[in-house]
Image: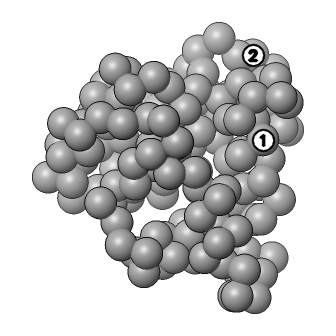
């Protein structure tokens, strides 16, 4: 798993974040976290085969493999049993990191991602970590 310093560096360096399991419901955590990350300067790519039309002004994709641009971080808002397939897709598209949100835990998938060279965060909220670790830094992505 990533150290605090690795998390801070990833948050500082990442630009494009694919949000797997993104909801179009503004009350859902995936939507709120994506909006927070977008407000903080990241490019957000919603990933959910059930979405159509723009979500937070972004075009959704049915799967990670449908995305045509480079992805830095894959944030996972799906149940833990779906993580292994998402990790394989993240490896296939050349993502730099996997970020399993709070409550999303799959040790075998985390190990697989690390073996493939990806950075891994598990059972952590990217928005919470951003607020905690980046508050001292000037607005990085502004």
Q: Earlier in the sequence, mark 2 or mark 1?
A: 1
- Judging by the rendered image, the residue that carries numbered circle 1 is 32
| Circle 2 Cα neighbour tier, 10 Å, few/some/many (<14 / 14–19 / ≥20) | few
Furthest-front residue in view?
A: 103
- Please tell me which residue is depicted at 34% across the width and 50% down the height of the picture: 94
The colour scheme used to paint the residues is one colour
Residue drawn at the location 85% of the way across and 30% of the way down: 26
- Please provide percent x and percent y for residue 52: 75, 16
- Examine the rendered structure and indicate whether residue 115 appears above or below residue 21: below
Label 2 – label 1 distance at C-alpha: 18 Å
- On screen, residue 50 versus residue 63, left or right, reads right
Decide which of 82, 142 is in the foreground and name it. 82
At x 14%, y 52%, the residue is 115
Q: Quadrant of residue 89?
A: top left
Q: Residues within 10 Å of mark 1 (few under 14, many from 20)?
A: some
Q: Secondary structure at mark 1?
A: helix
Q: Position of residue 137 (x, y in %)?
A: 69, 88
In the rendered image, the quadrant that contains the C terminus is bottom right
Disc sitting over residue 52 in the figure: 2
């Amino acid at each position: 798993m990533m150290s605090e310093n690795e998390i801070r560096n990833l948050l500082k360096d990442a630009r494009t974040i694919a949000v797997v399991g993104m909801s179009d419901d503004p009350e859902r955590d995936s939507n709120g976290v994506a909006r927070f990350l977008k407000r903080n300067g990241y490019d957000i790519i919603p990933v959910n085969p059930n979405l159509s039309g723009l979500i937070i002004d972004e075009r959704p994709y049915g799967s990670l493999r449908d995305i045509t641009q480079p992805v830095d971080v894959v944030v996972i808002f799906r149940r833990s049993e779906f993580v292994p397939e998402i990790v394989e897709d993240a490896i296939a598209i050349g993502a730099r990191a996997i970020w399993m949100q709070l409550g999303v835990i799959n040790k075998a998938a985390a190990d697989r991602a690390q073996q493939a060279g990806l950075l891994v965060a598990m059972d952590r909220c990217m928005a919470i970590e951003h607020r905690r670790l980046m508050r001292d830094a000037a607005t990085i992505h502004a």
